[in-house]
Amino acid sequence: MERLRPIDRTVIVRAALGYLVVAVIATVLVAVANSMPGVRNVYGRGLGSIVDDLGVVGGWCRFDCGWYIGIARDGYSYVPGQQSNVAFFPIYPLLARGVNGVINDVPLSLIIVSWISGFSAIVAFAAWCSGRLDRRIATWAVASLLLYPYGFYLLGAGYGDGLFLALVVCTFLLLERNQLVLASVFGALAGATRSIGIVVFISLVLVLIDRRGGMPARESGSGGLARIGIPAAISLRVLRARDSVLLIALLGPIGWSLFLDDRFGDGFAYVTVQEAWVQKQGPRTWLKVELFSQILHGAPPDYWVGRLIQAFLILVLLSLLPLVAKKLGPGYAAYSAGVLLLAALGTKDFQSMGRYALAAFPVFALVGIELSSRRRLGVIVLIAGAVFLGAGAFGFGRGWYLS
């Protein structure tokens, strides 16, 4: 079994302080952007008046935040063929509803949950990194995630990405510390936060098998499969009867489907409703026909440039998976591949891929490993990331569609 280092408190403290500094700067940028003339107040379903009362932090509540406000305030609704809030999984708005019971302000409750979630995600990621990397490299890895250009979704934006990241990192952190029951519970919560619960479950099993030596590496001269990190075998014999508790991780997505079936008669309404966003699952969505059609018919650059940048970003991250397999294990490479590929297949035009990539945390650890040995390049990359992160936070506060 892979031996882990003790969790390094210095890395944890650096991550916590780093998050607080970056979150404050990002919130200032959002506040400035939101206070300037000409801001696009885009909140979703006619919820502008209650968000306007938030003042300086109101810029963190844009676009899908409006859907979450409706869920936290009024619960779920579904009209087949129309955009409906069943597209959004329940844990994030439910937590906001709990906070709202204390402060009586739904939009601010969402932002508070986002702050706490983002902080928890960065700290948990630091703990996970410090268990396998030395202090210097782990710090580089944390910086790579914290200064990722789409990282403003961890800094206060009214979206559930920070919560999912916090839950899923804790899931694997607990698994590695042999806390299988707690890992499964966190996995279930992650599976009720985003629609990739099955990826989390399968990856938990693969990481456990790998940690017990059931996924031996191929010989270096065995061809292309060795180069991309595919193990020589996957031995289920290393699993034990008590490992069946990992099935608890499936209760999140299963419970969500049971609720939807009972309430609306469609256990997969969160998939069905995607048709209302013109991204019904099938070859048209998978092959990005909508995106290329828009480009060929003269769509303006502000439509397609950002989407193609996100497509390129995903290709870059996917290209790093062989290194993830070699340096962090094939289980984590499989998890990252599942996160990135399912998200890419599910969108009609690569929109939102930038923030979905946040969930592929092992890739950011790999980036930190590589940058730590190339100090000059690393500094340039982190500075560029910080600049684009600040620009993204400012643009989000202005109401630019950057999700």
Image: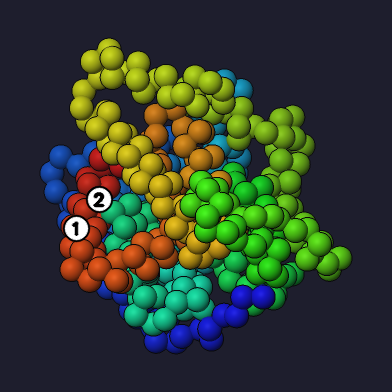
- Vertical relation: 102 (above or below) 261: below
Indicate the position of residue 316 as horizontal and vertical percent values. Answer: 36, 46
**Residue ID for mark 2:** 392
Indicate the position of residue 195 as horizontal and vertical percent values. Answer: 59, 44
Quadrant hosting residue 149:
bottom left
User: Between residues 191 and 276, which one lies in front from this camera angle?
Assistant: 191
Mark 2 residue type: Gly
Tell me the residue at 39%/34% (across/down): 350
| Quadrant where the image shows the N terminus | bottom right
Quadrant hosting residue 97:
bottom right
Quadrant hosting residue 22:
bottom left
Mark 2 Cα shell of 10 Å, populated few (<14), some (14-19), many (≥20)? many
Tell me the residue at 55%/63% (across/down): 329
Indicate the position of residue 137 as horizontal and vertical percent values. Answer: 36, 75
**Residue ID for mark 1:** 384
User: Between residues 273 and 220, which one lies in front from this camera angle?
Assistant: 220
